[in-house]
Amino acid sequence: MRNGYADLPLHGGKAPKWLFERMKKLAREITLAIVIQYGTDEFLRRISDPIWFQSFGCVLGFDWHSSGVTTTVTGALAEGLKNDEMDLGIFFAGGKGRRALHTSEDIALWGEKGILSLQTVKEFQHTSRLVAKVDSVALQDGYKLYHHFFVFTKDKKWAIVQQGMKGDTKRARRYHWISEQVKSFVSDPHSGIAKTSRSKETVLNLVDGEIPETRTKITEIAKEKPEIVLKEAKYLKMPAHHPVLRTDFNEKYLTKVLNKTHELKPENFENLLLVKGLGEKTLRALSLLVHLIYNSPLSFKDPALFSFTHGGKDGYPFPVERDTYDRSIAILKEAVNKAKVGEYEKLRALKRLYKFTSQ
């Protein structure tokens, strides 16, 4: 797969009201056209594709090279389709900042409305928390999450768009997930990650598919009595060849977290990630211990598939994969051609007629 390049610097502010109102209408019509023409599964695939997502933002008229395209596009979708979820079969939860923190409550509300069963509500809430923990703790790339957008359908399929920021470099990074591609939440789970420059990031990647034994060892050591783990930690020297792992072993805090993991005894790495209080430093410490005691490999490969850097005034992302990119263009072009306010009812009538005549 080839990398393409465009620019996504970290921008503050928000879209002006006159523009956002138009974005909501156009986002609604394009989404309706895609769902009617291709189905809800295809919409999930599109929104989980970083290049298509960026192109969608361009079509809506937002600043193509701004990190704000993520929050603005997802906001336009949620607002524009607010009264169409039931008919369309696509539902939204979460968003930027505080909205991200209320994703579980949003999912529960859809359950109260009869859209989801109690079991599915619990499954989606678990998925939401786990995905956020993977991108904030298990994938340590220096970006702090501030946006979490959960999209799902009635048949339990979902896609998630998250974004993190690195304030000191004024960069942003977007993480895309889709249920149909997730075989494991902790082993190469992403459908794509869009980063903001060609510069090499310092990354500790504990969800690399090539280090399953390391994840197992980390889980095992987390179950040990804290005094045993801390005794080992005191005799370890921090290696100089992987700066990302330099951390001071805060014995007081480590003891607190290790007491909890020892008591809970998580069955696997997924469950370990969900232990309350377990963050980047604790997981780095456990990773280092496992690496040095058992010689278990660590991964420093950045899983970002798409990289973005400065482009011209009218620039746009270059193709990542020709067939995928061409299909994205074709779908957007057809959707835009049909995306005229009022066309929705006409498209629905034609679809009903097609179903009737094909029986």
Image (cartoon, helix red, strand yellow):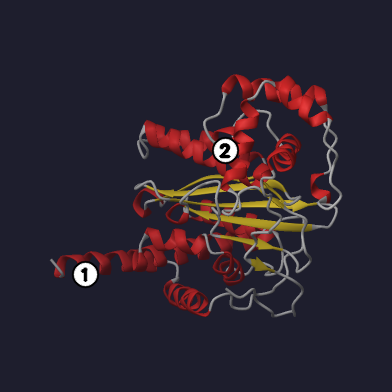
Camera-nearest residue between 107 and 207 = 207
Instruction: Describe residue 21's horizontal placement relative to residue 14 as left or right.
Output: left
Image point 87% across, 49% down: which residue? 240
Q: How dense is the environment of label 1, judged by Cα within 10 Å: few (below 14), some, or many (20 and up)?
A: few
Instruction: Describe residue 236's horizontal placement relative to residue 195 as left or right.
Output: right
Q: CA distance from mark 2 to mark 1?
A: 49 Å
Disc 2 secondary structure class: helix
Residue corresponding to mark 1? 354
Instruction: Describe residue 88's horizontal placement relative to residue 220 as left or right.
Output: left
Question: Is residue 342 among the parts visible in the rendering?
Answer: no
**Amino acid type, residue under disc 1 in the picture:** Tyr
**Amino acid type, residue under disc 2 in the picture:** Phe
**Quarter of the rendering containing residue 349:** bottom left
Image point 46% across, 39% down: which residue? 124
Disc 1 secondary structure class: helix
Residue corresponding to mark 2? 269
Camera-nearest residue between 242 and 344 = 242
Image point 56% across, 65% down: which residue? 53
- In the rendered image, the quadrant that contains the N terminus is bottom right
- In the rendered image, the quadrant that contains the C terminus is bottom left
Q: Residue furthest front?
A: 294
**Which is closer to the viewer, label 2 or label 1?**
2
Question: Residue 232, percent across and down?
Answer: 77, 29
Check the image and report above or below for 84 versus 47.
above
Question: Residue 21, percent across and down?
Answer: 58, 59
Q: How dense is the environment of label 2, judged by Cα within 10 Å: few (below 14), some, or many (20 and up)?
A: many
**Quarter of the rendering containing residue 119:** top left
